[in-house]
Each structure stands twice: as C-alpha cells, then as structure tokens.
Amino acid sequence: MIQFFTSHFLNTLTLGQWLILALVPPAIVALYFLKLRRQPLQVPSTYLWSRAIEDLHVNSLWQRLRQSLLLLLQLLLIGLLIFTLVRPGWKGTELVGSRLIFMVDTSASMNSADVKPTRLDSAKQQALALIEQMKPGDVAMVISFSNVAKVEQTFTDNRRLLRQKVELIAATNRSSDLSEALRAASGLANPGQTGDPNNKDDIQTAEAQPATMYLFTDGGFNAVPTFRLGNLKAEYVKVASAKPRNIGIVAFSTDANPEKPGQIQAFARVENYGLATEKAVATLYVNDIELDSQNVEVAGRDPKNDLPGAAGVKFEMDTIENGVLKLELEIKDDLPLDNRAYTVVNLPQPAKILLLTPGNDALELALATDEAVKMAKVTRQPPKYMEDKKYLDAAADSSYDLIIYDQCAPKQMPNCNTLFIGTLPPGNEWQAAPKAFPTIVRDVNQLHPLSQLLAMENVKILESTPLTGPPGSTPLMEAYVGQGADTKFSTIYMIGPRAGYEDAVLGFEIVGVDEKGDVVSNTDWMRRRSFPVFVLNAIKYLGGVRTGLAMPSVKPGAPAALRALTAVKTLTVRSPRGEQFAIDREAQNQFIFTRTDDLGVYDVREGSGDKVSQKVAVNLFDPRESNLEPREKIEIGEEISAQKAKQVSRQELWRWLLLGAIGLLIFEWYVYNRRVYL
C-alpha cells in the first residue's frame, strides 16, 4: 500500500499546511449550519412583515442542514484541489541507480528539427523526466558535451538545481567528441581513473561508487573503443527520428579562373544525407547582393555503402579584390545550419621581408622575379644595418615577416622567422662542423614546404657545413660531405623551432668572399631551375604568404590565426552577433582568436581604428554533423545499443484535475447566480 502511494502520489505540502487545508471543508459545512440572525424592525408595510415572517424559523443559532447543490459543488471543488496537491500520476520505466550522470550532446546535429522542436530540446526533456524520478538520497550530475565537455553541475541531490542546469544547456555549432566528456564522468565515478587504458598514472584514490551514465545523443561521434567504463553503466538514449532529411554544403571556396584571366570561380560541394533525391536552389551573394542562382539536384544516400549523394556547384564572376561571398540553399530540411556557407575574398597580402647581404646578385634576382614580387615586399640592406636603431626596433616589434641573413648574423635573434645562408644563428642551440669539400646532395625532404619540388641531383656545391639544430629540428637536405675516409652523410639544410618562430639554416654559401676579398661562387645552384623554387618556398612558408584568393575557412570552436597588416599590439574582432573581443599579439606576429562559436563572418580591426582590415569566415563544413542518420549502436569500451527516445517520467494528472476544478468553479458561480436548488 505504501509503495502504491509513493508510486502514484507525491507529497507537496508540510504537515502543518495539510492540517490547515483539512479545516477548509468543515468550515464550509459550518457556514451552512449557521442560522441567520435578524434584527426586529418596525415598518409600516405589511408586505415587509410577511417577508420577515418567512424567516422566523432562523431565529436560533443552528438549523438542520438542507439539501444544497452549492454545498456539494463547493465541497467537490475543495476535494479536487486537495487531490491535485498530492500530484496523482503514474511512472513509466523505473529509474535504476542511486548515482546518475546525465550527459547531453550539444553538437551541431542536435539542432536538427526532425524531433520537435529540436533534438536538444527533446534530450533535455528526457533528462528532466529522469530527474523527476529520483528518489530521496539519489544524487546526479549533469555534463554537456560537443568537441569539449562542460560539467554543468557536480553530484547533488537537489532536484531543483539539477533541473535548472539542464534547462540552461544551450546548443552549439561545434562537432561532437565524446572522449573528454567520458574522462570527466570517469574521473567522478572512478576516483583517480581517466578511463584510458594507456594511462599508467591511474591510481585508485578513493572508494569507487557505481554510477549509471545516461547519454542523450544521436550517436554522431567517433567510437572510443579503448575507454574503460569501470564502475560506469552506460545507457544510450537515442534522440532522433528514424528518417531525418538533410542536404548541406560541405565545402565552399573561390580562386582565379585559369582559363579566363580577369575572372574568378566559386566552387561548392553539396551532399544529401537523406534517402530521397532532393532539389534546391543555390543562390550566390557578393557582399549581400544577389549575383546568380542555379538549380541543384542531389541524389539520395546510398544505403548499401552508406555514402551520401553529392553534387557540385560552380559560379563564374568578375575578379573582386575583397568581399564576402555567401552561398545559400533554398530548401526546407531538418538542419538549416549547413544550408549557408561563406568565403572571404582578399588579395594575398605581400610578406614583409628584409634581406641583409653584402652582395648576392643571384639571390636578389630570385627575389625580384614577377612571382616573388607578387608575394613579398623585399627591403635590401647591408649587414651594418643591423646596428641601426631602425633595425633594432623593427626586429623587436615584429615589423618583418621574414629576415634573410646572407653571410652575416645578428647579435640577437629578431621576433620573426629567419633564413640564414652560410652562417649560424647566435647562441649555442645551433652547431656546425668545420667546412668540408666536396658536397654531393643525396636526399631532399619533399614533404616539407620549404624543400618540396627541389631537384638537387646535378647541383655542384664546393664547401658546406654539417649542421646540428635545436631539439625538434627537421632535416631538409642531406648530403655526403668530405672525401675519402672523412666523408660523412650530414644535414646541410635544416629548420628548427624558436619560441613560436622558425629558423631555417642553409649550411653552405651561395657566393662568398675569398682571401683577396673577391666575390666567388660556392655553387652552380643559381643556374638551376630549383634555385628560384628554393627562394619562393622560403617566401611562402617563412613569410607566411597565402597564395589563394580566399581566406581559409575556420570550423566552429577552432582557433583562427590572424596576422596584422601593420605593427599593432591588439586586434579587435567583431562576431556575427555583434560581440567584440580584443586579442593581444603572440609570437611570430600572430593573433590567436578562439571565440569562433558562431557561424558567419567576423570583422577584424587593427589597434583602435574603425576600418575593417580583414574578415574571417566560420562554416560548419562537417559531414559527420550534417549526416543526421542516428546510430543504432555506439562503442565506448563496449558496444551499447540505442534505447528508443521514450518518456520515462511520471505522467501527471494534476493539470486535468485543475481544469476540472476550474470548470466546477464556473458551474458553482452559475448555480449561485441562477438560484438553482435541489
């Protein structure tokens, strides 16, 4: 009997409040027992006396209770209200466990409207339903996760607080990654444990207590097969419909048209993750002005290979120096986030390069080619310029993107990338063996941007210096140095890290000065095609030159590396929703912006200026999030099958009882005003 009452009714009042409420029905009945007391009045009208005679039977305090419809209605009304206060209802599935972890997926796919109003709203409602089932003594915690995890609420038995934290969970545009959330849950359920079997530092620091972990998600994340659940029992609650419908843009870029000079092309890839063929209208905007549109038809997903249908979209337009291109798909599907994409068109800014050399015609000629001039603004100075205050200030303020030291070296390293030719950077991190003759190049690292496409097979080098760089250095060119028994296979071109910058060192001179002071050549490399390639590689990589028209797109939540066009210490970034953020300069003249959660275009201003110097586009471009097909099983240490999204909360009757009480109140008012009696 007690179990039946606790299962079907909830106590909402204290004992004192119940006692006060219990006095209300007797008070109503007592009012009907009371007799009217009349004061005798002398009036000349016999009619009034006749009315008074009718009330002679109420001249005492109590009377017999007469049959009254009003009394019955009032007592029934109070009874319904009292019954409503005990919140009658019944439960669905019984909640298992006294320690609960509610993990709610907030990734981009949870914005889908295939479950009304959205998947996230449905997940939150199911989490709230489970919280309502918690028994006295149960504790729970709430974790939200996308590609990062956030502990919304640590373990508590305060159901009101748990409900508040769940209701405050907001959707994101980020991708989904369960790893961090699992580590957070495991650290609380298995003290001292991370769940990673490769972590040798796991130590049981406290008595572990079993916990049930409810995952409210569509399963759109990578498997975590090596995770150890330990004392965690995982329940996968699938939040998705059986056949979601979505078509989305997964790539959007622009570049010059190689066949038509003076024109540029915009390309997009559209994928269909539903089973049916979809038709949409793709519209291209330039700075919010409609430029062109075309119909797109995308075949449905292939269920056998689980591959989405795909189609390409291409637009042609006149060259623009800068602006924002926006592509929109006009279609009503379940996920609008991937129906819009942006790309920012900016002509590449030339790198600021300082060349310090006593004289090197071949190097200066390579830096003066048409291709090099497009990518870099080169300033040439003699080595004595390193003593000038202008150089010292510029080197300290990151005014240059790259400084090339040819046959010379500074006393102190600058705050930028460097290329040393025939010399070593100052300090002890770089070491060089004595020069040796001859040098025969045998291996070039074709994977690194600095040395790719370099053909050195027929290049003759007289003397070179074997190099040893700081920890983390990467060999770029290796050769046999020396002759006879002294021949060694050594690195003669290398790049190494330096506090956020990179230093490349070429272990041989291109030209040098002999004992007589005459300029002599140390190699015939400058006569080969690979020499200008070597120079262009250095400009692109060490100078940080962007070669395409479009700025790289950033994914939501990913950091954006910005470079200032002028020597400023602060950039101001304005998000698509109007929020402004100030970011300070870091190493290598970079500004790292991390508040990229909103989709759209971010405006960047330098220093205290009002003019927008550059823009950054943030797009979803995530096939895993665009693919709304729910996963029937997830793998987190073991394979877990999905539960159907079902309402396990109490089914409440109090709302219907309250509506009935209101109806009774209206009927009682009607009876009173119409003087209806039984």
Image: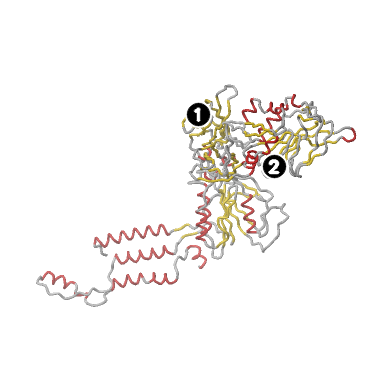
Where residue 440 sits in the image (x, y, percent)? 82, 30
Residue at horizontal 48 percent and vertical 33 percent from the top: 287
Q: In the rendered image, which quarter contains the C terminus?
A: bottom left
Which residue is tagged 1?
A: 295
- For disc 2, the marked residue is 413
> Which quadrant would residue 60 be assigned to in this image?
bottom left
Residue type (three-letter) at the residue carrying disc 1: Asn
Examine the rendering and report whether any part of residue 281 can be seen: no
What is the quadrant of residue 615 in the picture?
top right
Mark 2 closeness class: few <14, some 14–19, many ≥20 residues within 10 Å: some
Q: Residue furthest bottom?
A: 60
- How far across and how far down the image is residue 300, in percent? 56, 34
Mark 2 or mark 1, earlier in chain: 1
Above-or-below relation of 384 to 134: above
Snapshot colouring? secondary structure
**Image location of residue 594, percent across then percent down:** 58, 45
Nearer to me, 330 or 553: 553
Residue at 59% x, 43% y is 591
